[in-house]
């Protein structure tokens, strides 16, 4: 099977942007930096820590420890568990592709109770280039053994959509923070509110069918 489902984490598998914004505000406030939701969406959402540091002065401390400390009970975005059930049934590979630090990603996935169901974790900061470069998604495709033309990526940020589209993937844009038009303009082929949208399964089935047809004619 050359079909894989590749998921961003924050804003995609869980709606965590509000918590991230609060954590950044707590870290920035003592330094006189005001951060509102618009600035967060434009400059921070989906960006790597390195990119954020360059923009907001490299001497500022990381918000990640504050974010991890504030984590409470987490719930995945509606329909995520059912989509993973479907992936199990169809034997689809899956991976998480994120610019979040590994410590954050592992803690969040464990809190969501889906860490074991997403065994491949690609961390942008551990690669030579992170999102919006295509490398994180190209790495995920290599690790899953999947083809871009047979797979789907799920993203909520501009950097994430551009990274996945640049790797040749069809991208499902999650409208947790950005609007549908913004995500579509960045390269998403369809936008959804959550994982219950029937178009997601239609896209996956089309790719599974194409994969099966290719194996039959090979």
Image (cartoon, grey):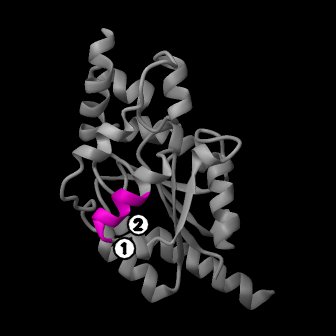
User: Residue 126: image x %, image y %?
Assistant: 62, 48
Question: What residue is at 49 percent from the left and 15 percent from the top?
Answer: 57
Circle 1/circle 2 CB separation < 8 Å: yes
**Magenta region's main secondary structure?**
helix
Q: In which quarter of the image is the C terminus?
A: bottom right
The tag on residue 9 is none
Residue sitting nearer the eye, 1 or 203: 1
Q: Is residue 144 visible?
A: yes
Which residue carries the number 2 mark?
200
Question: What residue is at 28 percent from the left and 63 percent from the top?
Answer: 111
Question: What residue is at 40 percent from the left and 37 percent from the top?
Answer: 181
Residue sitting nearer the eye, 178 or 56: 56
Q: In this view, does 212 lie to the left or right of 175?
A: right
User: Residue 4: image x %, image y %?
Assistant: 57, 71
Confirm whether the magenta stretch covers residue 206. no
Q: Is residue 161 left or right of residue 64?
A: right
Which tag, 1 or 2, sits closer to the chain's start?
A: 1
Q: Is residue 190 visible?
A: no
**Residue farthest to the top, as pictured:** 32
Confirm whether the magenta stretch covers residue 108. yes
Residue sitting nearer the eye, 63 or 35: 63
The tag on residue 83 is 1
Q: Callout 1: few (<14), some (14-19), or many (20+) C-alpha neighbours within 10 Å?
A: some
**Residue farthest to the right, as pictured:** 218
User: Residue 103: image x %, image y %?
Assistant: 44, 52
Magenta segment boundaries in residue numbering: 106-113
User: Residue 99: image x %, image y %?
Assistant: 51, 44
> Considering only vertical position in the picture, is 31 above or below 12?
above
Q: Callout 2: few (<14), some (14-19), or many (20+) C-alpha neighbours within 10 Å?
A: some
The answer to which quarter of the image holds residue 211 is bottom right
> Considering only vertical position in the picture, is 207 above or below 54?
below
Q: Is residue 187 left or right of residue 197?
A: right
């Amino acid at each position: 099977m050359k079909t894989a489902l590749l998921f961003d984490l924050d804003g995609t598998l869980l709606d965590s942007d509000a918590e991230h914004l609060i954590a950044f505000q707590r870290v920035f406030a003592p330094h006189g930096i005001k951060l509102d939701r618009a600035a967060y969406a434009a400059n921070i959402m989906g960006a790597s820590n390195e990119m954020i540091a360059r923009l907001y002065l490299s001497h500022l401390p990381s918000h990640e420890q504050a974010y991890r400390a504030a984590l409470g009970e987490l719930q995945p975005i509606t329909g995520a568990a059912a989509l993973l059930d479907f992936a199990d049934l169809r034997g689809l590979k899956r991976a998480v592709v994120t610019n979040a630090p590994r410590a954050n990603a592992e803690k969040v996935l464990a809190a969501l109770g889906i860490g074991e169901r997403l065994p491949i974790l690609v961390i942008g900061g551990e690669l030579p280039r992170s999102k919006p470069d295509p490398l994180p998604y190209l790495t995920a495709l290599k690790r899953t053994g999947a083809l871009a033309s047979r797979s789907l990526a799920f993203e909520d940020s501009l950097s994430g959509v551009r990274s996945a589209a640049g790797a040749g993937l069809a991208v499902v844009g999650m409208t947790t923070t950005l609007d549908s038009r913004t995500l579509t303009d960045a390269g998403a082929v369809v936008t959804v509110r959550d994982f219950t949208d029937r178009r997601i399964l239609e896209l996956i089935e089309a790719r599974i069918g194409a994969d099966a047809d290719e194996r039959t004619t090979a």
